[in-house]
Amino acid sequence: MSDLIPFSIALRERSSRAHSSSEHAGFMADLMKGEGTRDDYIALVAQHWFIYEALERTAGQMRNDPVAAVFISEKLTRLPALEADLEFLVGDDWRETITPLPTTRAYVDRINEVGATWPGGFVAHHYTRYLGDLSGGQFIGRLMSRRFGFGTNGIGFYLFDDIADPKAFKEVYREQLDKAPWDAAEQERVIDEVLLAYRFNTELFDDLAHAKAAQVA
């Protein structure tokens, strides 16, 4: 990685195409265009629960790692909000009604693997999820609220009440990426893992579309 290009910028540039492909996948594009249903949104929230349960559980394992620990913040924690959203959207028995789709299971397995063995890989998934939530996720939350009349109920996942300035928070996060003690080879590995995370996201949207089609058939 060139010393002239900060790692955070190289990471963003190298993953921009994968990011765009993920957010324009059919299922998500339909939801954003208003062609998706409330049940479609609930299905997405349910899969998010499995992903963030793994990510935040492995964050507990990484808290003592000197590299990974600087990225972990209680302000980012999403699991309680997801659980409140599911209780509102599905009911008290939501845990008995949701199941992970195949891509979600693979995604969770990968988070569990890197979260136990590889700080850089953990940071790659942490970065992909949370900085996305603090960026486009804010727009998605507002859109879903208007689309389905939720108010704040049902979109708590997208509300970061403890982060007053998301832009400033993301700038600090990127500065931490630039300071991470990774050589060029490790930076490449982290970028590859971010690309894998985006691939999981895209394939999850495909799974959601297939699951929806199977219910209709």
Image (tube, helix red, strand yellow):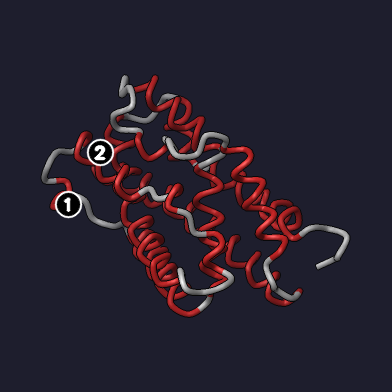
Query: Residue 207 at x, y = what percent?
Result: 38, 52
> Around disc 2, counting alpha carbons within 10 Å, would you say few (fewer than 14), some (14 to 19), or many (20 or more)?
few
- Residue 217 is at least partly visible in this image: no
Q: Which amino acid lies under the numbered mark 2 shown in the image of this protein?
A: Val
Residue 41 or residue 131, whichever sits in front: 131
Query: Residue 71 at x, y = what percent?
Result: 55, 59
Write down the residue under mark 2. Answer: 216
Query: Residue 97 at x, y = what percent?
Result: 16, 49
> Which comes before the other along the chain, label 2 or label 1?
1
Q: In which quarter of the image is residue 170?
A: top right
- Residue 174 is at least partly visible in this image: yes
| 131 on left or right of 215 | right
Q: Mark 2 and 1 residues: CB-CB less than 8 Å, in contact?
A: no
Q: What residue appears at the point 85 percent right and 65 percent down from the top-left corner?
A: 2
Query: Residue 49 at x, y = what percent?
Result: 32, 51
Residue 211 or residue 110, whichever sits in front: 110
Write down the residue under mark 1. Answer: 95
Residue 81 or residue 189, whichever sits in front: 81
The number of callouts visible is: 2
In the structure shown, which secondary structural element does the residue marked by tag 2 occupy?
A: helix
From the image, which quarter does the C terminus lie in?
A: top left
| 188 on left or right of 41 | right
Nearest to viewer (mark 2 / mark 1) = 1
Q: What residue appears at the point 50 percent right and 33 percent down from the top-left corner?
A: 138
Q: What residue appears at the point 60 percent right and 48 percent down from the top-left corner?
A: 19
> Around disc 1, counting alpha carbons within 10 Å, would you say few (fewer than 14), some (14 to 19), or many (20 or more)?
few
| 103 on left or right of 92 | right
Instruction: Farthest residue to the bottom: give it.
Output: 117
| 14 on left or right of 51 | right
